[in-house]
Image (spheres, rainbow, N blue to C red):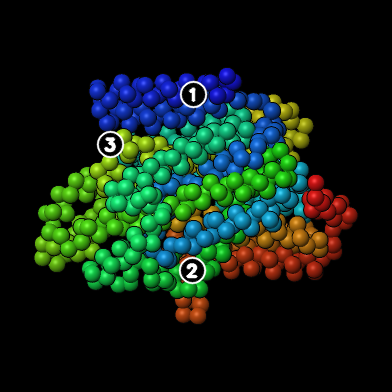
Amino acid sequence: MSPVVRNPLITAVVVVLLAALAYPIGREYLTSLILIIGSIAVYLVLALSIRSQSTGDFYVAGRSIPALVNGAATAADWMSAASFLSMAGIIAFLGFDALPYVIGWTLGYTLMAFTIAPFVRKSGTYTVPELIEKLAGGWPTARVIAVIIVFITSLTYLTAQLTGVGVVFSRFLGIPATIAVFVGVFGALAYAWTSGWRSITWVQFVQYWVLIAMYLTPIVIAGAALGLLPLPWVQYGPLVGEVESREAAAGLSPLWTEPFARPFAGGTGQLNWILAALVLMLGTMGLPHILVRFYTVTSVHAARMSVGWALLFIGLLYTSASIYAAIARRAISELWNKPLEVVQNTPWVQKWLPTGLVKVNDANSDGIIQPAELSFHNDIVVVGMPDMFGMIWLIAPLVAVGGLAAALSTADGLLLAMSTAVSRDIYKRFINPQASEEGEVGFVRVMLVVIGLIGGFLGYLALSDPNFSRYVALMVGWAFVFAASSFTPIIMLGIFWRRLNRYGVVAGMVVGMLVALPYVLAVGVFNAPPLVLFGQKIGTIAWGMISVAANAIAAVLASLATSAEGKEREEFVLQMRMPD
């Protein structure tokens, strides 16, 4: 048996045995500690088993990853702590109005398969900034600007991931979340340190199966408890109908399924909903740590196939998020119009009240808890479901293991996208073009540590400062706004419009970010009133379509107003578009 398989397998067996032996001694806490920390150890052993010093392995995994493996790794890289912990919660509380997340994040992959993925692989480049420089006719300025945008986008996303790691560790290990966030940084750094994209791709491949198994298990158990047989997915329609009936009986308005009835990402109405879905779709196509995935596969065909596999694997979680939401909403509705003491003494409510994620407030002092007097944090839908249905204690830490895998897998990709951008696109390109392969890999590792500590510090702020943490939930969406406003239009124009030149590339990226970033900061962070279009407030995510349009218009006008690029740039584009 290969060491790559044998070593992690032995480690996993040891972790399970230790957990079994620890249960009679330390009961739930010690066993949970071993399972959660042990999962990190398994990933680390796998990464060490395939360690490498090659720059090709660090930057593009040696272009050797099979399509199915890359698809699962992409899914793990994609399904962050926000998808695992918060997606179901957002749907549970916003209902129909939360669907832009599901629609945008899945359809974006379909578009990516046809418009970007094969061409990125065919380009022969190693990083997104290098691709941007090629599309700009070899102009170094475009590459530097692209590196800056990679950092703006990836740090925004990374902060949310590390915050999720802190929440998971804090809940199940009993340590402060502000300290736990640095444990997450260590885990992410350890996997990426060994051999860059090669090591984290195989680690993420394993993490995908861990996270999806831990995500689906509580659904199946809860569904069986509610009589949703043979599987909850088959009974989704009747389940939603039951939830609506309970809401109507309780006098709730609007109902859970009523469209465009609740604010989404700070905006309101149908226009905001549609624009937000489009932004999340286009942002999917421009995320740096996802685009890099298409460099790692063996061929152009494999790049396209890996997108298909990724969409299938992502769909398993995304179609399940709505089931989670409906089951949780039904469980919560059982507490409506019950006496205060009954609600407070419900075992799972009693367990979660001290965390602040569940709040009971008898506002009218009538001793009966109305729906509006019972509030929940989004994240309780997933991490709290084992408690809601009285599942054996082991299920909860296993869900934590899955959530940790989701957060760490995405953090890995983000850290490596930023560190390789600095190494290859700044250090190797401008500072030391003659750097040896060993020196280049060493520089990547140094940057991993530096950027990891910066990300950890931002996560620490998010968890320790109430004024900062109030908008962390939106930060994942903002990362998509920045990606859509900068890279997506330029890459698509660069592939399909020969007239795009260096000035168009730079003008598009700069104008797009200058339109997107101030609005996100002003409305999302500093609470400025949002812009109103056709009587509807435009939220920070929906605003991204305005900046996408600004990017495309600026790129086209700047290109038409200046001279075309030479034959070298045209030949590069033609080579990208030529079928294998």
Q: Earlier in the sequence, mark 2 or mark 3?
A: 2
Q: For numbered disc 1, what is the local secondary structure?
A: helix
Disc sitting over residue 483 in the figure: none
Q: Residue at x 34, y 30 (%)?
A: 33
Where is mark 3, residue-wise? Answer: 393
Q: For numbered disc 2, what is the local secondary structure?
A: helix
Which of the two residues, 91 or 186, is positioned nearer the viewer here? 91
Q: Residue at x 57, y 30 (%)?
A: 193
Residue situated furthest bottom in the rendering: 534
- Residue 222 visible, this orientation: no
Cα distance in 3D space between marks 3 and 1:
25 Å
Residue 12 position in % (x across, y down): 44, 25
Q: Amino acid at mark 3?
A: Trp
Q: Are marks 2 and 3 in contact (CB under 8 Å)?
A: no
Q: Amino acid at mark 1?
A: Leu
Where is mark 1, residue-wise? Answer: 9
Disc sitting over residue 273 in the figure: 2
Q: Is residue 103 above or below residue 437?
A: below
Q: Residues within 10 Å of mark 3 (few under 14, many from 20)?
A: few
- Residue 495 visible, this orientation: yes
Q: Residue at x 38, y 56 (%)?
A: 235
Residue 351 position in % (x across, y down): 22, 44
